[in-house]
Amino acid sequence: MASYNAPLEIHVHGQVPLRADVSFDQLQEALKPLWSYAGASSLVKGAHSAYEDEPGIKFDAQEHLLQLCWTVSGDEDIRQSLDEMCMSLNELSLTGATIEVTFYDAEFDEDEDGDDPEATSRDDFMMLFVGPNPAAIMQVQRDLLVQDIINIMERHFDASELGGVVAEVDRMFSQRFDALVSSLEIGKPPRGPSGGHGGAGHGGGGRKPRHLH
């Protein structure tokens, strides 16, 4: 649980489109790993950021959107809470989405430690992905990667020259998706006399990530 003497400030930022039928109670339960880490007893009490100029955790019921711009004091142990939160949000999300998490070392003083060659900051950054199925998650990963590649390569090439690079990224993600589907197919029970699959269904099916050319 977070404390006032925690060595890190953790900033969580992103927007997650939610299904139209998602209720506040469902979202509160999904976000429990986050607000309980902050020491709150409910989402309402834990939604406020450590900084007043940040909107915190907002649920836009009309737009069916979760908005995150929230900072809490903590340590590396928050990573488990973030993983649990993402697993729960997967079931409520409408499309794939990214959540950015930035770790700021609250104990590192650049001015005081500048003369110490062994002094290093614990600043860090990570991207989390949520989505209703693996295809949706891979799609947002693919889009983010393509945008990063284009931003870098447009310094040297015209955008019209990058079609082959984008196609190669699409091919690689298609291979990853096919491998995932194959692994899930292996785990399915054999077809019964009626031709249907017995037991519970497996996630990860559905359409492939769309290819943008």
Image: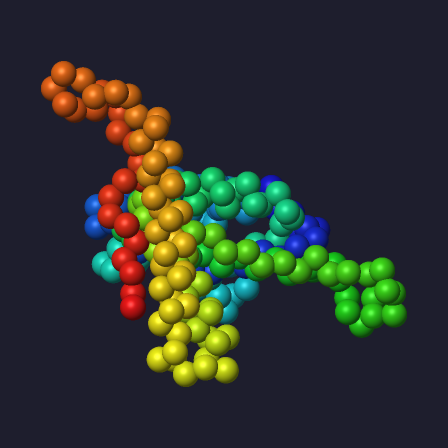
119 vs 38, nearest the viewer: 119
Residue at horizontal 70%, vertical 53%? 7
x and y percentages locating residue 105 in the rendered image: 69, 59
In this view, 190 is above or below 166: above
In this view, 195 is above or below 210: above
x and y percentages locating residue 207 in the rendered image: 24, 48
Is residue 27 visible to the viewer in this orientation of the structure?
A: no
Is residue 2 shown left or right of residue 157?
Answer: right
Is residue 65 shown left or right of residue 73?
Answer: left
158 vs 39, nearest the viewer: 158
Residue at horizontal 58%, vertical 45%? 78
119 vs 69, nearest the viewer: 119
**Furthest residue to the left?**
194
Is residue 161 visible to the viewer in this orientation of the structure?
A: yes
x and y percentages locating residue 24 in the rendered image: 31, 46
**Furthest residue to the top?**
193
Residue 23, by quadrant, is top left
9 vs 211, nearest the viewer: 211
Residue at horizontal 49%, vertical 59%? 100
